Amino acid sequence: MDEEVRYHLEMHWHGKEQVTVLPLMKTLTFNIICSLLFGIERGPRREKLADDLRYMVEGIWSIPVNLPFTRYNRSLKSSARTQKLLKHLIGEKREDLKHGASPRQDLITYLLSIRGDKNEQVISEKEIIHNVKLIMVAGYDTSSALLTFLLRLFANDPAIYAAVLQEQEEIAKNKHGELLTWEDLAKMKYTWKVAMETLRLFPPIFGGFWKAVKDFEYGGYLIPKDWLIFWVTGMTQMDDTIFPEPSKFNPNRFENPASLPPYCFIPFRGGPRICTGYEFARIETLISIHYLVTRFTWKILCSDNTFSRDPMLAPAKGLPVQISPRKLL
Ligand code: HEM
């Protein structure tokens, strides 16, 4: 992950005077997933997948009427193309495995390597394709929104920025080009508290539909089996009985996360279906912030400080910033 972040900064930040943060953070998180989880090489195949994935996601929240030139129609076409590409990729990985590739080299190879009692493949090709598509959709728009809102916060709040920078510089000053380690990540306590408070106020996923598996009562209402329920992150995270002065940005609320009542901090949801990529997102965020704050300073170029949801979080104009390199320690 460290190598991916550094590569990204070399390619897209160094030598530039202006960048637009949101699309770049999407590029970064997409590339991290491709390299680390799916073993999809850099180049035309990855780029084609990135385009299709963008259209696929756009269609998830569109009106499901399949007419030409609609978002929905474009999304279905992209989804079919992605499916085809993944089928091809799985074929290649199956061959690699036959010729001695390590099952640990990426998630697809690992899933293909799981064998039952009669040495049969346990997870079908269809299941692998659907899981890969799910992880791709779930894992790149979300983390990129968090990173973008952190960069926006640092530009707008000098005190928080200074405290994060100090924590990260402490780590950077003992490094001479080596990769970050688990010990380094464990030292990024304040940075992660800031990220948690950002996730509380700006949750990338604002809610979702779940289906009642049985009749139940809540708040005096009967919710019948099979009804769809829309859970909303902000309703809980902005509740002043849980988080006093909920509109105030205060990372110290997370001084001791274990003291929070269960199911109250839910940007990753909770329970048995909590986000699978929670730890992945934490590591990705900390590493990216480490290199961004220690290598660059930035100033927002857009006077409009608002943001929208479509349904993903997006700051006005994608957050254009003017950047300057910092002297490497
Ligand atoms: C800041 C980053 C992230 C946030 C805020 C986030 C949030 C969430 C939320 C709220 C859910 C539950 C959705 C629901 O209940 O309907 C979820 C599920 C999921 N997330 Fe994440 N996620 C993030 C990053 C990631 C990453 C990086 C990955 C993969 C590498 C990932 C993979 C998944 C998967 C596979 C599920 C489905 C789990 C299941 O249904 O059992 N997420 N995520």
Image (cartoon, grey):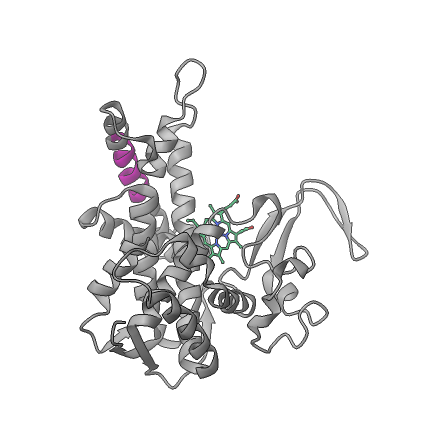
Q: Nearer the viewer, residue 262 or 91?
A: 262
Please determine whether, in this image, residue 102 is positioned above or below residue 254.
above
Q: Residue at x 46, y 72 (%)?
A: 308
User: On screen, 27 above or below 298?
Assistant: above
Q: Residue at x 35, y 62 (%)?
A: 288
Whether residue 141 is visible to the viewer of this picture, yes or no, is no
Residue 108 percent coordinates (x, y): 34, 36
Reply above or below: 310 against 101: below
The one nearer the camera, 279 or 210, is 279
The x and y percentages for residue 35 are 29, 47
Q: Position of residue 39 (x, y in %)?
A: 28, 42
Viewer-proximal residue, 117 or 192? 192
Residue 130 visible here: yes
Q: Is residue 72 magenta?
A: no
Camera-side residue: 306 or 295?
295
329 to 67, vertically: above or below: below
Q: Residue furthest right?
A: 220
Image point 22% across, 24% down: which residue? 99
The image quadrant that residue 168 belongs to is bottom left
| Residue 166 found in image quarter | bottom left
Q: Which residues are magenta?
A: 80-91
Main SS of residues in magenta: helix
Q: Quadrant of the C terminus?
A: bottom left
Instruction: Locate residue 182, reporting x and y percent.
Output: 41, 52
Residue positioned 57% across, 45% down in the render:
273
